[in-house]
Amino acid sequence: MSKVKYLPTNTKIDKNPPLRNNFGGGNGGPPIEQLLQRVTNVETMIPYLATKEDLTRECGSLRSELHAEVGKLRGDIGKDIQNQTWRFITWSTGVASALVAAAFFFAKIITNITP
């Protein structure tokens, strides 16, 4: 099972934090309350971020599951194709036999009708 945590839906995150008007140093930065709110938002999200190892583990397990399912599907498709091939061969043989029989029947009738 995955150890990746997801951000709870009830977490309030400010999606439009106020931007600084002056990017220079020392004069006119945002108030300390806004900075604390932004830091709190970031700290709230940190436990829910996946690490590189988490993603590698998740992708590896997903890849192995997908590989197993594709293997099963290939086997099933191969069996189905083989079954349909034999059905087609049987049907073709039956139709060909019926056509040959019909041709002989009509040939016999035609030779008996002519005087």
Image (cartoon, rainbow, N blue to C red):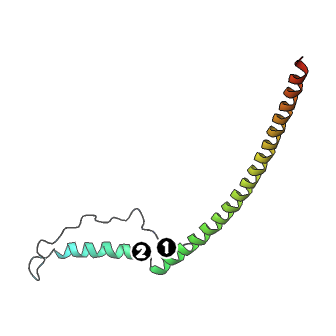
The N terminus - image quarter: bottom right
Residue beneath the point at 71% across and 54% down: 81
Residue 26 sits above or below residue 82 on the image: below
Along the line of sight, which residue is nearer the eye, 99 or 38?
Answer: 99
Along the line of sight, which residue is nearer the eye, 37 or 80?
Answer: 80
Q: Position of residue 8 (x, y in %)?
A: 42, 65
* Furthest-front residue in this view: 115
Residue 19 sits above or below residue 80 on the image: below
Q: Position of residue 14 (x, y in %)?
A: 28, 65
Residue beneath the point at 44% across and 79% down: 51
Q: CB atoms at circles 1 and 2 under 8 Å apart? A: no
* Furthest-bottom residue in this view: 26
Q: Amino acid at mark 2?
A: Leu
- Label tally: 2
Q: Is residue 69 left or right of residue 28?
A: right
Q: Secondary structure at mark 2?
A: loop
Q: Which residue is mark 1?
A: 4
**Res 107 quadrant in image:** top right
Q: Position of residue 89 (x, y in %)?
A: 78, 47
* Furthest-left residue in this view: 27
**Res 31 quadrant in image:** bottom left
Q: Secondary structure at mark 1?
A: loop
Q: Which residue is mark 2?
A: 49
Residue beneath the point at 83% across and 31% down: 103
Q: Amino acid at mark 1?
A: Val
Along the line of sight, which residue is nearer the eye, 17 or 109?
Answer: 109
Residue 54 sits above or below residue 98 on the image: below
The C terminus - image quarter: top right
Residue beneath the point at 20% across and 73% down: 33
Distance Cα–Cα, label 1 vs label 2? 8 Å
Q: Is residue 49 left or right of residue 12?
A: right
Of pointers 1 and 2, the one earlier in the residue sequence: 1
